[in-house]
Image (tube, rainbow, N blue to C red):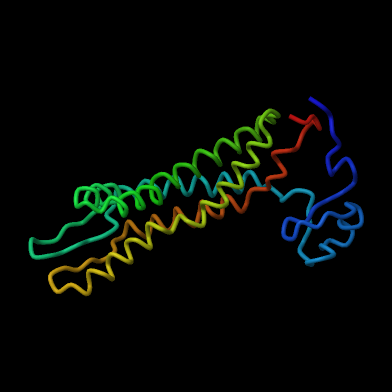
Amino acid sequence: MSTRPTAAALGLIACRVCGLVSSRLQTLNAGRCARCASRVQVRAPRSAEHTLAWLLTGVILYIPANLMPVMYTSGVQGGQESTILSGVVSFWQAGSWDIAALIFIASVAVPSTKFIALGLILWTVRRGTLPGRRERTKLYRVVEFIGYWSMLDVAVVALTSTLLQFKTLGSAEPREGIVFFCGVVVTTMIAALSFDPRLIWDGRTRDD
């Protein structure tokens, strides 16, 4: 492993908004980025604590989001309330495997991945773990990316409700569980945006 100087060691600082790298002393004295005028800080204050708080909120909201019904469907054979998982099973048994897979990925796989990934990143930052910093940075970028697709489950519920309204023999309505799931989506997105990925690279300047 070779030792390389960091931006901080070279007296440089990057803007988190536009990515402009400039003199740390000059930028901090001005308080703003010379290109986009965004506020520039060496590290976002209490970034890890804010991320942890939002992440725990998302985990708590995820419990009622799975236990409470997200949709009510009615037809000639009566009405039925469905949770996320029971909806996946119903669509699968009805032969709509694509919709079942979409709901499972958006409402189970994506949130679980974000919980585990952000938890792992926060834990390694807390411990000051050096190995795998590049991989953890890439993992954070993945969490940022998939966060924007988390509303797919809500979109599927809305689409299903709309389609059934055109059928005279059936209807569908969203239920309170979808509100909690929206809360999970919002809190986990804020958790990812609150985290300062530069914290991953703090510590010794050893390249791993």
Find the residue positioned furthest to the top. Answer: 1
Count of labels in the image: 0
The answer to whether residue 98 is left or right of residue 33 is: left
Farthest residue, direction left = 77
In the figure, 120 relative to 19: above or below? Answer: above
The picture quadrant where one finds residue 99 is: bottom left
Can you say which quadrant of the picture contains the N terminus? top right
Residue 123 placed where, x, y %? 60, 34
What residue lies at 84% left-to-right and 34% top-to-bottom? 4
Query: Residue at 38% of width from left, 50% of height from top?
Result: 107
Q: Nearer the viewer, residue 103 or 48?
A: 103
Give percent across and percent down for residue 80.
Answer: 17, 57
Q: Residue at x 73, y 29 (%)?
A: 208
Residue 131 versus residue 106 in the image, above or below? above
Q: Position of residue 184 (x, y in %)?
A: 44, 53
Residue 58's x, y, as percent? 47, 49
Q: Is residue 133 left or right of residue 153?
A: right
Q: Quadrant of residue 160?
A: bottom left
